Image: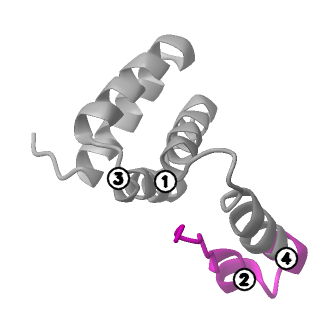
Amino acid sequence: MKEKIVQTAGRQQLGAFAPMFAHLNDDVLFGEVWNEDAIDMKTKCIITVVSLMASGITDSSLVYHLQNAKAHGVTRAEIAAIITHATMYVGWPKGWAVFRLAKEVWNEQE
């Protein structure tokens, strides 16, 4: 049986302040989009990491999605190749920033 993604961060962190945003995050983005079957979970993880990288997002949300990618089978060699490839299109500084986080997630030492 396929693993179902369940997210509660929206309600936990913004539920009282922004209930509509919390609903869209938890129920629509993670409840529906992430659980839709047309794209496998590993591919969704890769797309998300590259999308955040392209946007210059290098905060805890990228760390979460790198961890999610690792949990769904993206190997160290694959993430290194993905980041390297995407760097050629999104920019060198973004690649450096994402590699720093990826090394932490894949527990790679200096």
Q: What residue appears at the point 9 percent right and 39 percent down from the top-left corner?
A: 110
Q: Is residue 9 magenta?
A: yes
Residue linked to disc 4 = 18
Q: Specify which label sits upstream in the sequence, 3 or 2.
A: 2
Numbered disc 3: secondary structure: helix
**Comparing marks 3 and 2, which lies closer to the viewer?**
3
Residue 52 locus on image (x, y percent): 58, 40
Residue linked to disc 3 = 70
Q: Specify which label sits upstream in the sequence, 1 or 3.
A: 1
Q: Residue furthest right?
A: 20
* Pointers 4 and 1 in contact (C-beta within 8 Å): no
Q: Amino acid at mark 4?
A: Ala
**Mark 1 vs mark 3, CA separation in Å:** 9 Å
Residue linked to disc 2 = 11
Residue linked to disc 1 = 65
**Mark 4 vs mark 1, CA separation in Å:** 23 Å
**Mark 2 vs mark 4, CA separation in Å:** 9 Å
